[in-house]
Image (cartoon, rainbow, N blue to C red):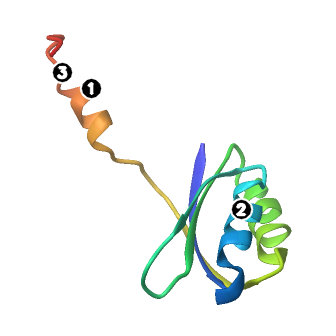
Amino acid sequence: MITAIVLISADVDRIPEVAQEIADLDGVTEVYSVAGDADLVAMVRVRRQEALADVIADRLNKVSGVTGTNTHIAFRTYSSHDLESAFSLGIED
């Protein structure tokens, strides 16, 4: 699975609509409304690298109200859930 984190700038008046339209795209698993330099952050997960262009360049960038994107490709995923499983002794809480 290939994961991309897409920072999205959007028209301020359309942020909720833009977020929902992006969330409805195949390959987009979550969209967050955030504070900071970006208005939205989208998590894109696809099976093949070529599919990133389809999701991000061909569809997400063309959503009405998107004014710019900055895409980051994840190399590895770390989470507390994975670490808990790795260090589990098999004792349930």
Query: Crowdedness of circle 3 by 10 Å Cα count: few (<14), some, many (20+)?
Result: few
Foreground tag (2 vs 3): 2
- Please name which of the two marks, 2 or 1, marks the residue nearer to the observer: 2
Q: Which of the 4 quarters of the picture holds residue 21?
A: bottom right
Residue 44 or 33: which is nearer the viewer? 33
Give amino acid for label 1: Ser
Which numbered tag is attached to residue 85? 1
Where residue 29 appears, as percent x and y from the top left, is: 62, 49
Residue type for callout 3: Ser
Measuring from the top left, give residue 68's x and y in whole percent.
68, 86
Considering the numbered disc 3 on the image, is that residue within a helix, a strand or a loop? loop
- Would residue 32 appear left or right of 91 to someone viewing this image? right
Identify which residue is drawn at 78% across, 60% down: 55
- Position above or below: 65 against 60: below
Amino acid found under the numbered disc labelled 2? Gln
Question: Camera-side residue: 17 or 41?
Answer: 17
Q: Quadrant of residue 19?
A: bottom right
Q: Position of residue 66 (x, y in %)?
A: 74, 82
Q: CA distance from mark 3 to mark 1?
A: 5 Å
Residue 11 is at least partly visible in this image: no
Q: Circle 2 sits on which residue?
A: 20
Question: Marks 2 and 3, how far apart in space?
Answer: 38 Å
The residue sitting at the top extreme is 91
Q: Which residue is mark 3?
A: 88
Question: Callout 2: 10 Å neighbours few (<14), some, many (20+)?
Answer: few
Q: Is residue 35 above or below residue 6?
A: below
Q: Looking at the figure, which quarter contains the C terminus? A: top left
User: In percent of the image, x 76 and y 54: which residue is there?
Assistant: 24
